[in-house]
Amino acid sequence: MGTVVDLVDETALTKSIVLELHEWQGHRAGQHVDVRLTAEDGYQAQRSYSIASAPGDDNLVLTVEGLDDGEVSPYLVHELRVGDSLELRGPIGGYFVWEESLGGPLFLVAGGSGVVPFRSMVRHHRAVESTVPLRLLYSARTLDEVIYRDELARLAASEEVDIRLTLTRGAPAGWDGYRRRIDRELLEEVSWSPQDRPLVYVCGPTGFVEIAASTLVGLGHEPARIRTERFGPTG
Amino acid sequence: MSFVSRGFRGRRREDADPARVPPGQYVTPDFPVLSAGPTPHTELADWSFTIRGAVDEERSWTWDEFRALPSETVTRDIHCVTKWSKLDTVWTGVSLDTLLGFVETDAGYVTAFSDGGYTTNLPVEDLRDGQAWVAYAYDEEELEPEHGGPARLLVPHLYFWKSAKWVRGLELRDEDQPGFWETYGYHNYGDPWREQRYWGD
């Protein structure tokens, strides 16, 4: 069980829920939790959400995109208030995780809200002062839809990690990032070469992950070094 | 029931029979995809299905041989550990009763293995008596790669990660050995009606 201590509007559709937890075993960067909601008559609904905070952060943070036809996400984004309790189970998942011992170079490929588990990984990478080379390629439709925009901008300005953004539906004047969908050319340009054997994580909507992962395989990357997490609009 | 999520009403589906939806699941008309890695694309000419391990004699089928085996079309409800259930899905494939009929074995367990390195473990008895198939068609269309094509295991009475995509064979074992997700925190058996999602459930 957690208590909501803060709510942060990340984009028009996306909110970060900052939780103070009572009894938490800790998590690894990339894991998720199950959130369970209970109505007065006992009806329950549960969904999984990626953890956006690093293992060493003070609070657990979930970043949730509100889906129009969803059941749990609209409640989390529009109804939940500071002080409310939230029932959580986790952490869950032991494969889509990164920790220093797994090494790199680390190549993270995010589509839309697929960036959430990577925020945990990047923060963890900084918190442990990892020397593993890290590169994040994040595809969003517009700059307004970029989650963690200020934090990513600060990281992009640092020497420790390499943050690249691509906007697929129009960029503001003066935009110096990429302006196209993730394709073979872009992945070839941004990724390490297959000879460097990067450890690749891809997260986003199913179609995005299918394209990114299969393109990377086509470029010669080892399938066994590509870890994926896909989500459909399931609510 | 002590805890209530303030302001939560939920959106119950009126059109789904609650008796067909296991605890913690919701019904979706979609067919979401979940996989741990890239989707393998194996040429049918290179495809085979093998039963090996604790059997009297290893058996293997090419794609054409496999497609020539007697097939069944079944309608079943499926339940994914990520909470969605999909009702009345229609699959065509070869029954495991047929496949296991080609070998003699006293083994109690199976590891299903797939292209891409995925594995999952099951008791042999969960594959017999009309409970499991190797399916190559969904809704009477050939099974798409992202849903496990050319062929996937179908064990609808267990959570759907047990229905290994891109399946290439079964290894019979005398002792149980956890597969991929079973090693990464998911339940060893995975009965949706007992909500066996994770370790400790």
Image (cartoon, coloured by chain):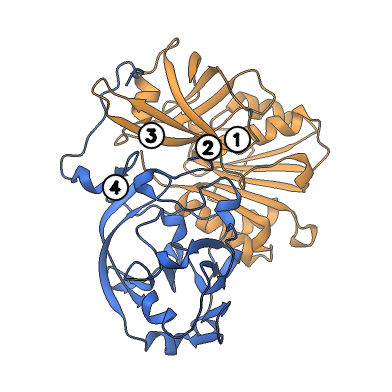
Chain colours: A orange, B blue
Q: Secondary structure at mark 1?
A: loop
* Residue with the mark numbered 2: A171
Left or right, B84 with reference to A166: left
Label drawn at residue A175 = 1
- Look at the numbered discs 3 and 4 and tell me whether their residues touch, using CB distance below 8 Å: no
Question: Can you identify the residue that label 3 sits on?
Answer: A46
* Mark 1 vs mark 3, CA separation in Å: 39 Å
Q: Residue furthest top?
A: A83
Indicate the amino acid at tag 3.
Gln
Q: Report the mark closest to the observer, 1 or 3.
A: 3
Q: Residue at x 76, y 58 (%)?
A: A197
| Amino acid on which disc 4 is placed | Thr
Question: Which mark is first along the chain, 3 or 1?
Answer: 3
Q: Nearer the viewer, residue B186 or B135?
A: B186
| Identity, as a three-letter code, of the amino acid under mark 1 | Trp
State which chain disc 1 sits on.
A
